[in-house]
Amino acid sequence: MTNIKLSEQERDNLIKELSIKAKDSNYINPELYTKYEVKRGLRDISGKGVLAGLTEVGEVHAYILDENELVPVPGRLSYRGIDIKEITEGFLKEGRYGFEETAYLLLCGTLPNKSVLEQFKELLSDAQSSKAEFARKTVLHIPSKDIMNVLGRGVLSLYSADQNADDISIENVLRQSIELIACVPLIAVYGYQAYVHQYLNKSLVLHSPQPELSIAENILHMLRPDSKYSKLEATLLDLSLVIHAEHGGGNNSTFTTHVVTSTGTDTYSAIAAAIGSLKGPRHGGANIKVRHMFKDIKENIKDWNDDEAIKNYLTKLLNKEAFDRSGLIYGVGHAVYSVSDPRAEILKSYAEELANEKHVEEEFNLYKKIEKLAPEVIEQHRKIYKGVCANVDFYSGFIYEMLDIPEELYTPIFAISRVAGWCAHRLEELTNAGKIVRPAFKSVAPKREYIPMENR
Ligand SMILES: CC(=O)SCCNC(=O)CCNC(=O)[C@H](O)C(C)(C)COP(=O)(O)OP(=O)(O)OC[C@H]1O[C@@H](n2cnc3c(N)ncnc32)[C@H](O)[C@@H]1OP(=O)(O)O
Ligand SMILES: O=C([O-])CC(=O)C(=O)O
């Protein structure tokens, strides 16, 4: 392209210079957003989301309308109309793993009876064994430190193993959905093993999935060199998969699925895009950030019972003076919930039980303190329309750590679970919409003339 050769230093300086130009020329005066009534973040002035679709897959309930006033209430989440508390209590009481039946419920709309569930599990394990070799090959080829990146690539590469990849009929997309629910756990765990081998110099462990095991059990079986896990570990991982599986159509990754699906593209492209969205630290990627933030808190606060010291640290977080300097307290706040996130409540009760068992009650108490103090500090420093509360990402990493699950897999576990919700929404989009998603953007750039090279 050119004969100019830049030294590394010159290249860095040039990029810095160009980035200043890029920053300057991309700045838009915030007043213009008000002037043109832009719904920033697709939210109205009170923080409520713009209505962009209808769904029967999941419902996020966080407020009621009282004489046209939004009144925040404790959060509730239902899948196909059934409250997740009832779903989780149901299969736990009956001594079953619940993720497979939850996936069926999301995709097909009803609870499966015993024989239908057995057939569905058969479809999942068939897909696991037929695609295991391909999944291994794909991820072992280019290991990465970031398993969400491995997942995105892995899902895209499944396109090449699919003879009918571009067919977007419901029948074909349902088949692809079942295969993805079965294969994404394999890609994540093998991706992690490849990372451990390549970057941490450890032996490469590759266990094949076992057809008689649930998805949660298979994750632990493939992850652990000795394949051992306890019933409690598998039960908690399964529970976590169930409560992360779906969250309505408006969350960023599911909305991404709707947007990308609306173009008529293939299933692998849509799900890879959703994985990219979920990775973000303001979305599913917050679970790993929470763990890192707590490591930093523990290093910086000597007395974990000192409320003032904790508040000072939290204020530093908001002022971009501590931890990753993003200005965020991770695991706290939600676009819809304000009083409580029902999933955080479920996870909190199991975190307490596990913490007592593992004798890390002090750390659990620190979590509880931050859960109480962070909303107070956020409300002092930010313009809040509704309250803030701990979200699903607040306690999940703490539980995973107690279950000895490596942190590289925290967000991928979210993705393994949410694939079920994404696929259900893709099926819903394909069934109903038929309209490409295309909001408007107003140009606020001044008109300019093209200047010939010699005059610039
Ligand atoms: C699975 C999930 O995706 S759950 C969410 C996981 N994400 C996190 O835990 C990251 C931390 N939390 C956040 O960044 C936010 O709470 C979000 C992105 C989840 C929701 O943000 P919003 O919809 O803007 O929430 P809300 O309208 O209540 O926020 C009001 C203000 O408080 C700020 N705020 C809300 N939560 C936080 C927080 N945890 N830390 C710092 N500021 C916050 C918002 O940035 C916003 O300020 P701004 O108007 O200056 O931008
Ligand atoms: O609904 C949201 O914005 C984020 C969320 O909790 C999820 O996707 O689980």
Image (tube, rainbow, N blue to C red):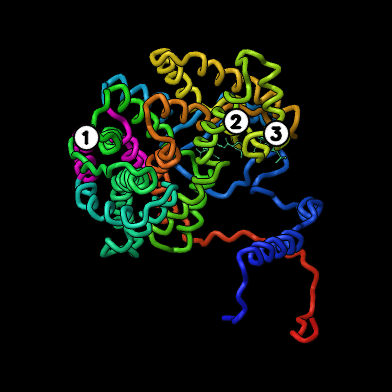
Q: In the displayed structure, would residue 174 be above or below residue 409?
A: below
Task: Report helix, strand or loop for mark 2.
Answer: loop
The earlier-in-sequence mark between 1 and 2 is: 1
Quadrant of the image occupied by residue 370: top right
Q: Quadrant of the N terminus?
A: bottom right
Q: Residues within 10 Å of mark 2 (few under 14, many from 20)?
A: many
Return the residue at label 1. 213
Q: Amino acid at mark 3?
A: Leu
Q: Are marks 1 and 2 in contact (CB under 8 Å)?
A: no
In the rendered structure, the answer to whether residue 139 lies left or right of residue 252 reads: left
Q: Residues within 10 Å of mark 1 (few under 14, many from 20)?
A: some
Q: Quadrant of the C terminus?
A: bottom right
Residue 260 location, x and y as percent? 48, 58
Highlighted magenta segment, given as a residue range: 97-125
Classified by dominant secondary structure, the portion drawn in magenta counts as: helix
Q: Amino acid at mark 1?
A: Leu
In the rendered structure, the answer to whether residue 139 lies left or right of residue 39 reads: left
Return the residue at label 3. 318
Q: Is mark 3 within 8 Å of ligand 1?
A: yes
Task: Report helix, strand or loop for mark 3.
Answer: helix
Question: Which label was assigned to residue 332?
Answer: 2
Question: Which label was assigned to residue 35?
Answer: none
Q: Is mark 2 within 8 Å of ligand 1?
A: yes
Q: Are marks 3 and 1 in contact (CB under 8 Å)?
A: no
Residue 299 location, x and y as percent? 59, 25
Q: Amino acid at mark 2?
A: Val
Residue 444 location, x and y as percent? 77, 64
Residue 91 location, x and y as percent? 31, 25
Q: Residue at x 47, y 60 (%)?
A: 434
